[in-house]
Amino acid sequence: MEVILKPYELKLRHTFTISRESHDVQPSLIVCLSLNGKTGYGEATSNPYYNITVESMMLEINAILKDIEDFNFTTPDVFHAFLMEKGLTNFSICALDLAAHDLYGKLQNQPLYSIWGTNLDSFPTTNYTIGIASIDEMVAKMQETPWPIYKIKLGTDDDVSIVKALRKHSDAVFRIDANCAWTAEETIRNAPLLKDLGVEFLEQPLKANDWEGMKEVMKHAVLPVIADESCIVESDVEACGNHFSGINIKLTKCGGLTPALRMIKKGKAMGVKVMVGCMTESTVGISAIAQLLPQLDYVDMDGALLLKEDIAKGVSILPDAKVIFPTLGGSGITLK
């Protein structure tokens, strides 16, 4: 296979702030895998919380470049198993795995959702994320992008008041993501107030390893709670299934579509809600997530919508939240 690595600086439409960080640019790595006249594209973004940079990903992929080029590619599963033996971080594996899936689908001339035996008769609508800012700025973002479901980032000293203020300007469904900023007591206290304000669920309110706190939350909270930072890899699903109402799978964190498919199956077997989220990827990463839609209860795939300018074409999300799938095989991606 031919391997090309393309680093990008994805400029955001607005400063994006969550409880622990703020940024205007999202660095991202695009991996291109070519074979038999077809090219597959994958993506992984940098993330300071997990100590991942574009440079670190490029360094470790380049270290095994010859092995990848010499690899006899047959299926994404076999390729993923090969990558797992190389000691790469999951972010680098994700970029390569997504490219391999896109390539495989293009070689088969079928979209991935079809290869997996699913169809597009029914699938969830993505939320649109509103980062932490002043009330006026958050309202302005909602008015700029009217949407049926908003994910509201919280983690301030006045979170419930923020939701009250935003509710005055929208009748959309709200989802709350505190990104580990609350205690169990705060979560239990806030939940009924937020439920009355039309909040659908809470995402990762407590620190990732606060299992005792989550036991208390699950006993008393009146809203479903979805694991994010607590659910990174396949082995986390069982523990999260016993402490949360659902799991949010991030392709970059778990290592791509290959393990994500297994995590979805495991989550469903445990009877918890299954969500897939994004990490502010371009349409390259979002198109891969979209292939999973028929299997999901919830989805957060608004990454490309948050960018000033996209770098690819593929699955597109229209201003009315409708999703358009391309006819091209795989994830349907072409770089601009």
Image (spheres, rainbow, N blue to C red):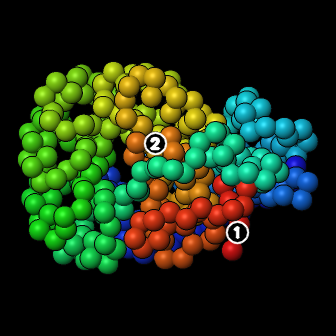
Classify residue 10 by image quadrant: bottom right
Q: CA distance from mark 2 to mark 1?
A: 27 Å
Q: Quadrant of the C terminus?
A: bottom right
Q: Nearer the viewer, mark 2 or mark 1?
A: 2
- In terms of secondary structure, where does tag 2 sit? loop
Q: As drawn, which residue projects farthest toward the front?
A: 121
**Is 10 positioned to the left or the right of 49 in the image?**
right
In depth, the one of 188 and 197 nearer the eye is: 197
Residue at (37% x, 29% y) in the render: 272
At label 1, the amino acid type is Leu
Residue 276 locus on image (x, y percent): 46, 45
Classify residue 41 by image quadrant: bottom right
Q: Residues within 10 Å of mark 2 (few under 14, many from 20)?
A: some
Residue 213 locus on image (x, y percent): 21, 27
Residue at (52% x, 29% y) in the render: 265
**Is 232 positioned to the left or the right of 133 in the image?**
right
User: What residue did someone put label 2 on?
Assistant: 296
Relative to 139, is 216 above or below? above
Q: Residues within 10 Å of mark 1 (few under 14, many from 20)?
A: few
Residue at (54% x, 76% y) in the render: 309
**Is 104 positioned to the left or the right of 232 in the image?**
right
User: What residue did someone put label 1 on?
Assistant: 335
